[in-house]
């Protein structure tokens, strides 16, 4: 499970965002609530720039991306992200077998979508683990879902409507059934924000409170060995404390005097390079002992440093 990158590639195919096709499907309602809130926030570019903690110049691009989340092209998670981790992974140069393995075994923890697998299709967006998103945009059903309460009687379920006729469905999406929603039906994630509509004022939505419990549950129920390469900010959005067969990675380097010191920004490159080696190897390790034996033979100084912690020295 990798951390995301602030930077993303533009473009993709004409398939629109389909929340039903994303991995960890129990997170669908939380994703829908947050997508709606981020789109509503983007009606006010200055407020959105402040919430996203970006400059006005950068906001011109990023806010436009967020406003069109449900209308923009999508591409595989593996190809969407750029930045230091993903430079080390170098997805464009992976052979087909390694890409196929990555699609099934590599995850990225998005602040907007929660954990997703590398083969899931998403649009370009801007949201970080510490962004301040107004909670105003959640519908009654969405607000109830965020707090764990049952939605009011008659509330419309939060779903992403099917694409218009003639639009190719997203990868993995189930065929839509029935006619388009009738007038007066519940809010649509694909509907454009009303012209001139001002966002309602509300306290910021805490991404930690929004994501931590459901993401933790999703990751704990996911089978197999879990290698947690996330930064601590994203770990807080879905802790896996106490999950069997789960290991958090720390990256160190050796100083001139032989002392070990933790890497900060540059630990990302090491995580990306280790991930690349793992997907090229294409081994579904059953245990951490199997992983460590492989790492030694592959030239990585990877060691078990605590019951649920790995140390990579570069």
Image (cartoon, grey):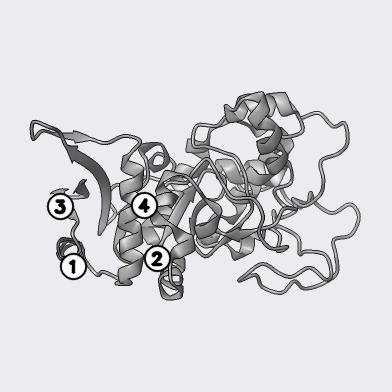
In the picture of the structure, the residue carrying the numbered disc 3 is: 303
Q: Is residue 176 visible?
A: yes
Query: Quadrant location of residue 18?
Result: bottom right
In the picture of the structure, the residue carrying the numbered disc 4 is: 272
Query: Quadrant location of residue 136?
Result: top right
Looking at the image, tell me whether mark 1 or mark 3 is earlier in sequence order. 1
Looking at the image, tell me whether mark 4 or mark 2 is earlier in sequence order. 2
Q: What x and y, as percent, mark residue 47? A: 69, 24
Residues marked 4 and 2 touching at CB (< 8 Å): no
Mark 4 crowd level (few <14, some 14–19, many ≥20, 10 Å Cα): many
Q: What x and y, as percent, mark residue 104? A: 44, 69
Which-is-in-front pick, marks 1 and 4? 4
**Label 3 secondary element:** strand
- How far apart are the alpha carbons under marks 4 and 2? 14 Å
Mark 2 crowd level (few <14, some 14–19, many ≥20, 10 Å Cα): some
In the picture of the structure, the residue carrying the numbered disc 1 is: 290
Looking at the image, tell me whether mark 1 or mark 4 is earlier in sequence order. 4
Q: Relative to 296, does residue 201 appear above or below in the rendering? A: above
- How far apart are the alpha carbons under marks 1 and 2? 16 Å
Looking at the image, tell me whether mark 2 or mark 3 is earlier in sequence order. 2
In the picture of the structure, the residue carrying the numbered disc 2 is: 105
Q: Is residue 202 visible?
A: no
Residue 26 image label? none
Residue at the image position 74 percent from the left and 70 percent from the top:
168
């Amino acid at each position: 499970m990798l951390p995301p990158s602030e930077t993303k590639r533009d473009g993709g195919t004409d398939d629109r965002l389909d929340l039903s096709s994303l991995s960890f499907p129990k997170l669908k309602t939380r994703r829908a609530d947050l997508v709606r809130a981020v789109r509503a926030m983007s009606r006010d570019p200055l407020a959105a720039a402040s919430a996203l903690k970006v400059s006005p110049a950068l906001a011109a691009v990023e806010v436009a991306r967020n406003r069109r989340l449900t209308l923009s092209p999508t591409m595989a998670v593996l190809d969407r992200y750029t930045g230091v981790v993903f430079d080390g992974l170098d997805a464009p140069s992976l052979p087909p077998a390694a890409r196929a393995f990555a699609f099934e075994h590599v995850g990225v923890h998005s602040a907007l979508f929660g954990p997703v697998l590398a083969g899931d299709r998403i649009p370009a967006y801007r949201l970080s683990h510490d962004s301040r998103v107004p909670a105003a945009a959640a519908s009654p059903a969405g607000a109830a879902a965020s707090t764990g309460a049952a939605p009011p009687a008659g509330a419309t379920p939060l779903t992403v409507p099917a694409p218009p006729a003639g639009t190719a469905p997203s990868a993995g999406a189930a065929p839509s059934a029935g006619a388009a929603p009738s007038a007066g039906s519940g809010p649509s994630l694909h509907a454009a924000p009303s012209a001139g509509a001002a966002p309602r004022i509300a306290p910021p939505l805490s991404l930690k409170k929004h994501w931590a419990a459901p993401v933790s549950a999703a990751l704990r129920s996911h089978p197999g060995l879990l290698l947690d390469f996330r930064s601590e900010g994203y770990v807080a959005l879905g802790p896996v404390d106490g999950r069997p067969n789960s290991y958090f990675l720390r990256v160190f380097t050796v100083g001139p005097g032989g002392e070990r010191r933790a890497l900060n920004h540059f630990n990302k490159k090491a995580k990306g390079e280790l991930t690349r080696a793992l997907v090229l190897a294409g081994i579904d390790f059953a245990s951490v002992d199997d992983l460590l034996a492989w790492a030694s033979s592959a030239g990585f100084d990877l060691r078990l440093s605590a019951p649920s912690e790995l140390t990579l020295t570069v």
